Image (cartoon, rainbow, N blue to C red):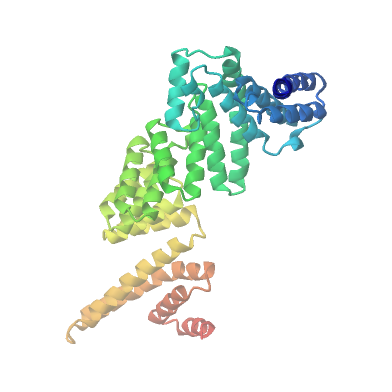
Amino acid sequence: MMKKTIFTLTTLAVTSVGFAQKAEVVSAFNYNKAFERSLKCSELQNGLASINKATEDATTKEWAKTWYYRGNLYFNVLASKSSKESCANLDADALEKCTDSYMKALTLNFQDPQLKSLDLEKEADLMKFFSAIQSQSKVDDEMYTMDIIGRKFPGLAGEYGNKGIGEFQSKNYKAAQESFGKSMLLSQFTGKMDTMMLYNTALASDLGGENETAKQLYDALIMLKYNVDGNGPSLYRSMANIYKKEGNDAKAQEYIKKGRTAYPNDYNLIVTELDGYLASGKHAEALENLNLAITNNPKNEVLYFARGTVYENLKQQDNAIKDYSKAIELKPDYYDAHFNLGAYYFNSGAEKINEANKLPYNETKKFDALKAEAKGLFEKAIPSIEKAHELNPADVDTANMLIKVYTQTEQYDKAKALKAKFN
């Protein structure tokens, strides 16, 4: 008889604990409602204390409502940031705890035991979840699913997006990548593909050195023809940059060509392709690119300068002079254009001198004629080289070229004075 009494008392004690934990769930619900009326942080604090006890109990931690109520409490912690009395200091991890609570509520809400064990951060399980929703698998409370997906997840997606922006601005790219990714995941539940967040995730992955992830995301954006704020062309350049860093120049050029096909008039893609042509000595292709670039952007002095260098390589001297001069017209203090124009005349003069020196001694008239031509070219070089020296007086190459043209034009005092500055 005594043993039976002890057993009965033990059973009563266990039952009392179970009722106590169930009461904690009810209390948490009531505290949350009280907060929504009073906006007092103490109500949320009490509610969180109650619900967190319930999440540790063997029975109540398996209830969808336990995690739904917990999610609602943390959601209100986040929502209170815009109220007079912010409760954000109750828990610095409210966003993560809120999201985790709702994820558990969604799966535990299913009556099918296999669906209860889904991990919604795994792609395969997420697909099973969507399939179960579409097939209308039985749940304990449809309102939980509707409220979480329809009302709560869009707000949390925005929170993660804002968090990611802050982390991105602080150059914490790994954290930003994770926050942007979480924002995209939550948006997926509503059937929405947030392409802007996809773009942000790609950027964070790229800058964080996650090359493979960045490439996958950029490719996805290219496939979706993403061009918000005109960022479509940059996707191709970003892909090219990654491959270039990896030493795969052929793949980099392939993406630039794809970009040029998709955005034929984009200035940055044209210039990027041009750099590749110039680096590989493909001057004819470079010229074609520059002609298009100048048509689209006729006031850009850099393009005229670049085309001048291409014309020089193609031995089209008159066109080279015109383009260097045009670049200077657009930007009078353009050092490189002044230097190249002066160097062109200087080199042409030097060629005449070399040609004259190779003549036989009996060809005096031809020798004198070539020397005169050379002097005329050196004189033409002087204004441009002097301007280049004025713009960059510390450059030794410019100064040496100027000393030589002064010498060749018999301006010995100027050559001596300039030479003294560099000795």
Q: In the visual, does 384 lie left or right of 84?
A: left
In the image, farthest residue toward the front: 1
Q: Quadrant of residue 344?
A: bottom left
- The tally of labels here is 0
x then y, percent, for residue 250:
29, 51
Q: Quadrant of residue 412?
A: bottom left
Query: Residue 211 at x, y = what percent?
Result: 42, 48
Q: Nearer the viewer, residue 233 or 392?
A: 233
Identify whether 355 is placed above or below 267.
below
Q: Is residue 19 visible?
A: no
| 420, above or below 323, in the image | below
Quarter containing the N terminus: top right
- In the depicted view, which residue is nearer to us: 186 or 209? 186
Asked whether, in this view, residue 170 is left or right of residue 414, the answer is right
Q: Of residues 117 and 371, which is closer to you in this image? A: 117
Q: Is residue 301 visible?
A: yes
Q: Position of residue 150 (x, y in %)?
A: 58, 18
Q: Nearer the viewer, residue 416 or 77?
A: 77
Name the residue rendered at 43%, 25% in the picture: 127
Answer with left or right where residue 124 lies relative to residue 372. Answer: right
